[in-house]
Amino acid sequence: MPIDLHAHSTASDGTEPAGVVVAQAARAGLDVVALTDHDTYAGWPAAVEAAQDAGIDLVRGVEVSCSLRGVSVHLLAYLVDPAAPGLGRELDRARESRVTRVDRMVELMAADGIPVTIDEVRAQAGVGTTMGRPHIADALVASGFVSTRDEAFTDVLRNGSRYHVSHYAPDPVRAVELVRDAGGVPVMAHPFANGRGWTVDDSVIERMAHAGLAGLEAHHRDHTPAERAHAVELAARLGQFVTGSSDYHGAGKENRLGENTTTAEVLAQIEDQATGGTDVVRVART
Ligand code: AMP
Ligand code: FE
Ligand code: FE
Ligand code: ZN
């Protein structure tokens, strides 16, 4: 019963519409998929429709961008009530700040002669999308400056780049509380993915656990075997469950649906801990 609880659509920085992501998940042989776009619920309706058509169970979620002293933390939030105002306001604020931040990054790049404009980046992102660096990367691919998103991220878009600008994001401990207030279940995404930039230390995760964190995404391609092992140990010490997921972004990343998976027991715990804001869509054919 393969379960993959982390995937992105064009509602954020994936390259396929939410309905296509869900259909692909069914085609990949998954029984359950979670749609977890960055800072938005916009993909949920299309995902529900596609789950019913394709006969796959769907967990509706969101990947909340958080930040602590300049270090980025991603918090997966499953089965939250999309009408909950506290979390909703933080997501709105982060999305708005992402627009200004992308504009600023593009201005800095254009001023240095890098071939990119704000209109080109907006066109790559489309309407109603959570904007991010991947959309700048797509515009740079379109203008021929780089050949892949990955190449853009190793160069002008990397965290330490002179063109990098940060955006508003809530404190991760506060975000955990807001996810619980919204009836959802918070799981820390790729907690030790050092290849992407700085990560927080165990003491921060301990504080998140005390605030209501439910699990750690131990099994993720951005973790080395040692980082996975550390996540599993820390989870055990803090009474957290562990998940595994693909972090699928369509053609935007090499990650393939189902490359890491979560057990049915852990999904049952997620469903048990959720307080009814949003249900798991159950349609898988048996
Ligand atoms: P942002 O949230 O705008 O700062 O951009 C970070 C996002 O870029 C992450 O959510 C990743 O999905 C994506 N990303 C990071 N590194 C890469 C990469 N090497 N190739 C493609 N996408 C990446
Ligand atoms: Fe992403
Ligand atoms: Fe992430
Ligand atoms: Zn993700």
Image: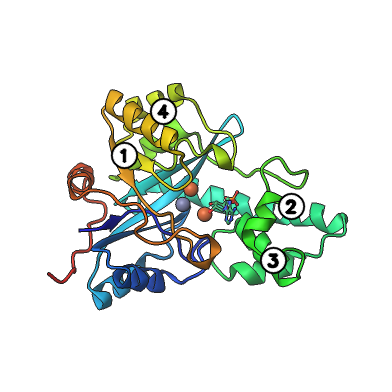
Inter-mark Cα distance, 3 to 4: 37 Å
Residue 22: quarter of image: bottom left
Of labels 4 and 2, earlier in sequence is 2
- Do residues under tags 1 and 2 come within 8 Å of each other at their CB atoms? no
Asked if the residue under mark 3 is in contact with the one under mark 2, i.e. CB atoms within 8 Å, the reply is no
Q: Report crowding for label 3: few under 14, some 14 to 19, many 20 or more residues within 10 A (C-alpha).
A: some
Q: Residues within 10 Å of mark 4 (few under 14, many from 20)?
A: many
Mark 2 = which residue?
105
Q: Residue at x 68, y 50 (%)?
A: 154
Tell me the mark number nearer the camera, choosing from 2 and 3: 3
Q: Which residue is mark 4?
A: 205
N-terminal of the pair, mark 3 or mark 4, is 3
Does label 2 point to a residue whose CB lies under 8 Å from ligand 1? no
Tell me how many marks there are.
4
Marked residue nearer the N-terminal end (3 or 1): 3
Amino acid identity at mark 1:
Arg
What amino acid is found at the position of numbered circle 4 in the picture? Answer: Ile
Instruction: Indicate which disc residue 200 carries.
Output: none
Q: In whole angstroms, how far apart are the C-alphas of marks 1 and 2?
A: 34 Å
Q: Residues within 10 Å of mark 1 (few under 14, many from 20)?
A: many
Which sits in the foreground, 180 or 121? 121
127 vs 6: above or below: below
Left/right of residue 53 with respect to residue 202 in the rendered view? left
Q: Secondary structure under badge 2?
A: helix
